[in-house]
Image (tube, grey):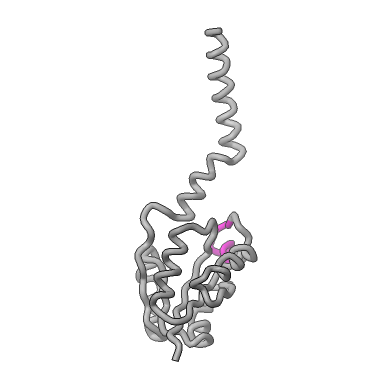
Amino acid sequence: MKNVVLTYGTFDLFHIGHLNLLQRLKALGDYLVVGVSTDEFNATKGKQTIVPFDDRQRIVQNIKCVDLAIPESHWEQKVGDIAKYGVSTFGMGADWAGRFDELKAHCNVVYLPRTEGISSTSMKKLLRVLDKEHVDDLRQALNVISAIIDRFD
């Protein structure tokens, strides 16, 4: 009998923390099913991704430790997926600790540590400096600096 592990995530801006989590989850079983949140589902959570769903799902499906990537389209699908795929372990990152404890009635639930110092949220914050408003502010500041430098020439 296969020991099936199930997890879910958005996996936007895929990074080493995502890979570490998926590898740790795969080590808990024989077969890893990964639900990738659709763009529409993310919108209901107030999240907007940078990478479109089809690309994120394709990236996740092609990771060596992932056996199957499926779409996650709503919160309530977890119990159905546990039954459909014969899941014995449901796992998430420790930042979700306690939020899926109701699934313990259907399978083992684990929360694994995150990789320190990296998250898609922190990456997106860093990328915000490249948005039009910030670039315009930077351009204005550089123009002021340039005018000051010109006075010394």
Q: Position of residue 77 (x, y in %)?
A: 53, 78
- In the picture, the quarter occupied by the N terminus is bottom left
- At x 49%, y 57%, the residue is 15
**Magenta residues, as a range?**
41-49
The one of 30 and 96 positioned closer to us in this rendering: 30
Residue 13 forms part of the magenta stretch: no
Image position of 29 (left or right of 46): left
Q: Position of residue 63 (x, y in %)?
A: 53, 68
- At x 59%, y 28%, the residue is 139
Going by the picture, which residue comes out furthest to the front?
Answer: 64
Q: Position of residue 78 (x, y in %)?
A: 50, 79
Residue 42 forms part of the magenta stretch: yes
The one of 75 and 88 positioned closer to us in this rendering: 88
- At x 53%, y 8%, the residue is 152
The picture quadrant where one finds residue 72 is bottom right
The one of 44 and 153 positioned closer to us in this rendering: 153
- At x 45%, y 58%, the residue is 16
- In the picture, the quarter occupied by the C terminus is top right
